[in-house]
Image (cartoon, rainbow, N blue to C red):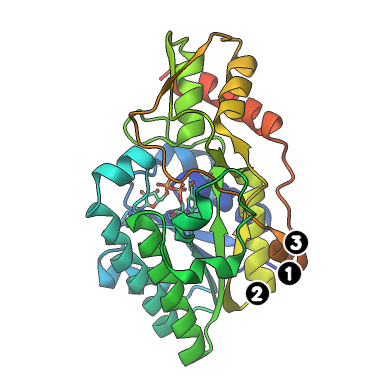
Amino acid sequence: MNWKGMSVLVTGGAGFIGSHLVDALINRGAHVKVVDNLIRGKLSNIAYCRDKIEFVEEDLTKRSVAYEATRNIDVCFHLAATVGGVQFMASHPAEIFKSVCIDHNVIDACWKTGVERLLYTSSACVYPVSLQKHVSQRPLKEEDAYSVEPDTDYGWVKMLGEIQCRAYHRAYRMKIAMVRPFNPYGERESFDPDDSHVIPALIRKAVNRENPFVVWGDGTQTRSFEYVGDVVEGMILAVEKTVNADPINLGSSGISIRELAELILKLTGHEIPIQWDTSKPVGVKSRKADVSKAKKLLGWDAKTPLEKGLKKIIKWYKETCQKS
Ligand SMILES: NC(=O)c1ccc[n+]([C@@H]2O[C@H](COP(=O)([O-])OP(=O)(O)OC[C@H]3O[C@@H](n4cnc5c(N)ncnc54)[C@H](O)[C@@H]3O)[C@@H](O)[C@H]2O)c1
């Protein structure tokens, strides 16, 4: 697909993944429009390219905003959603459902305004808890999600979004790609102690020399981390190569939280014993992605080794957040 001159909308483009996607699309020559209400996104994430994009600060729970945003758009990457770490999910059960409204508005608006292609950003949280209880579990395949027992209400919301996309594809032959990022990490991710994911949370504690160094859980739980640059490449490839609302995992084989914490301590030079806190929420026991579909359909794999990706985010945190 030739992105040069194409009109592309990125909902949630001032957020973590969205802002990296904006970079990648600008580099490909697309005209990019971002709609974000800045509830979690930051203008600083897109400050360097502010003069190259159209930015609209608006709330996509309003129907009219979604319709206005999608007018004269060729491709829509839909990322706006109510998102947060495991603590946020546990303490904001009702908030999460705003995404149902956002999803409906954006998907329906894309259909009504004739957007050529839509990418729906689903999540690994759609997978059943029962398939994530043991570290020896087999990697998750896309079809495993449809035995329907999503992890968290957020997983239900994403499942609903997927089902709506499938329905719009069936009813109107809309060209829709769907990706399920597992645990993306990288620069511009939230380091806010109230809502950060595990990698920023541990980096913040390690760089700030917290002692004791407390990590939630017992360290045996596994997650499938992938660098944000790899994830956005997968999203773009999905739009280029798939149209039939078929979900594709963007993940990796997974490592334990103990291994992750030890690696972060080593990379930050804060090598002290870890204190495990099993009273805190940790989510499912184990999460690994089967990425054979992404390899086959997109030629995609998470290329960036974890250590290399962690070094980038540590450097960014020290240069950006620590000083502000
Ligand atoms: N980061 C992850 O671990 C992960 C994993 C799987 C899927 N995802 C999905 O990827 C997408 C991007 O996630 P992220 O990690 O970049 O999160 P993020 O919070 O950084 O980005 C989401 C953006 O959406 C914006 N937004 C929220 N509600 C809005 C509204 N009503 N109107 C307009 N904008 C609104 C926020 O301000 C934010 O900039 C989300 O759909 C998320 O569910 C993320």
Residue 168's quadrant in the figure? bottom left
176 horizontally vs 312: left or right: left
Q: Amino acid at mark 2?
A: Thr
**Sequence-wise, which precedes: disc 3 or disc 2?**
2
Q: Nearer the viewer, mark 3 or mark 2?
A: 3
Residue 149's quadrant in the figure? bottom left
Local crowd at mark 1 within 10 Å, few (<14), some, or many (≥20)?
Answer: few
Q: Amino acid at mark 1?
A: Leu
Do the CB atoms of the residues marked 3 and 1 lie less than 8 Å apart?
A: yes
Residue at 47% across, 28% down = 218
Question: Residue 242, which numbered label?
Answer: 2
Note whether 276 is above or below 156 in the view shown.
above
CA distance separating discs 3 and 1: 6 Å
Query: Is 65 in front, or is 251?
Result: 251
Residue beneath label 3, please? 295
Local crowd at mark 3 within 10 Å, few (<14), some, or many (≥20)?
Answer: some
**Sequence-wise, which precedes: disc 1 or disc 2?**
2
Q: Tell me where residue 6 appears, x and y as whole percent.
A: 60, 69
Looking at the figure, which quarter contains the N terminus? bottom right
Q: Secondary structure at mark 2?
A: loop
Q: Tell me where residue 198 appears, x and y as whole percent.
A: 47, 33
Looking at the figure, which quarter contains the C terminus? top left
Q: Amino acid at mark 3?
A: Lys
Q: Tell me where residue 41 appears, x and y as whole percent.
A: 39, 44
CA distance separating discs 3 and 2: 13 Å
Note whether 218 is above or below 323 in the view shown.
below
Residue beneath label 1, please? 297
Q: Nearer the viewer, mark 1 or mark 2?
A: 1
CA distance separating discs 1 and 2: 8 Å
